[in-house]
Image: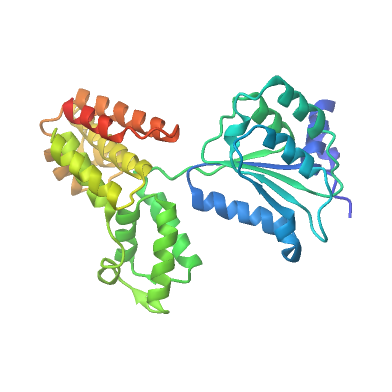
Amino acid sequence: MDNRPNLNHHSSLTQFQIEVLLIKQAMLIHILSGEDTVSLNNRINQIVEEHTHPQWRTFNYIKLNSTNQDTIADAITEIRTIPFGEGAKVVHINQASIFNNCADEIIQFMEENLKAISTTNGNVLLVTSTKIDCRGKAIKLLSKYGNIEEFPLIPSWNKKEIRNLINHSVSSYKLSLTSNAIDYLVEAIANNTTRLDSELKKLSIYAAGEILNKETIIPLVNNNTSKCIELAHACLTGKVKVALELLSNSMLSNEHPLIIAATLYSCFRTWLIVKAGMIEKLKDEEIVRLANLKNPKRLYFLKAEIQFASVEKLKQSLEFICSIEHELKQGINNLEAQIIKICSI
């Protein structure tokens, strides 16, 4: 079977573009990034299962964990060798940071070898990370011969998409949950896909084919999000001691710092939209729409919560929360200091 792309459909492409298309068709490079680690890991498993033979997978799936840039040359050399037995080989670099600030000789090595790699064995180079800097020369070079796929977390304020995700995940576990049980999971788990996967596994074992309602799952699934919401309220009202205590409790409950930051962002974003709407004297229906409130009656309570909060405080708080998220993604956990700053505004 001829697997070459039909170039008749690309008559408007330049010779260079056609050449790149041919290389991408033959040389399989997948660059995966994102904080939705469950979806990212599912995609990794899909690629490995698609390209390697089950009986030879132990030999043909090579995962390289080193942060040494010499790993790049090792991976490319490994890709050029034929796989054991049947199927192809997948070489997985799971520390994409090694491609940051590559020395000129490494870039030159990549340029000389990527195009020259034999494509007859169908081997795959897989590069993954929660965060990949696509501006670097090395990643740009890799993307020339492959594809970048992103797996971002759903924003914590987007309850509709979170609900859709949970519904889809529930069906994949062959679980039956009532509507109010789904609502509870939306609030309790939010966009934490790792925790969602863990909780649904637990519920599927407990359910044993039965339909579960909210009252049944509350004792089984802790609502850590409520603690994060309490933390947001403490920050809003400037209660430093309470805020730090709630932060400590959340961390002790193994709540991921990024989830804490996402919940804070969601709360302050909603408060800012409502406050701005009040100042602009918008109709309640319009504020409800802009703030994406599922229950319009919640607007009354939101207005009361921000009665004494200024727009400037809410805007500055959001800026600090964005700083928290940026720092966490850089591997810096400065949550406590930033929480104190927000409380002090």
Is residue 294 shown to the viewer in this render? no
Above or below, 120 relative to 143: below
Instruction: Specify the color scheme.
Output: rainbow
Displayed quadrant of residue 315: top left
Residue at the location (87% across, 47% down)?
120
Displayed quadrant of residue 231: top left
Residues 243 and 186: in front is 243
Above or below, 226 relative to 117: below
Residue projecting furthest to the top: 104
Looking at the rendered image, the quarter that the N terminus falls into is: bottom right
Above or below, 51 relative to 171: above
> Quick check: 198 left or right of 71?
left
Q: Position of residue 134 (x, y in %)?
A: 59, 29
Above or below, 3 relative to 58: above
Q: Position of residue 29 (x, y in %)?
A: 71, 41
Residue at the location (18% across, 39% down)?
243
Residues 159 and 279: in front is 159
Q: Position of residue 282 (x, y in %)?
A: 21, 32
Number of residue marks: 0
Residue at the location (40% across, 56% down)?
195
Q: Position of residue 255 (x, y in %)?
A: 33, 49
Displayed quadrant of residue 126: top right
Looking at the rendered image, the quarter that the C terminus falls into is: top left
> Quick check: 136 left or right of 58?
left
Is residue 221 shown to the viewer in this render? yes
> Quick check: 101 left or right of 325?
right
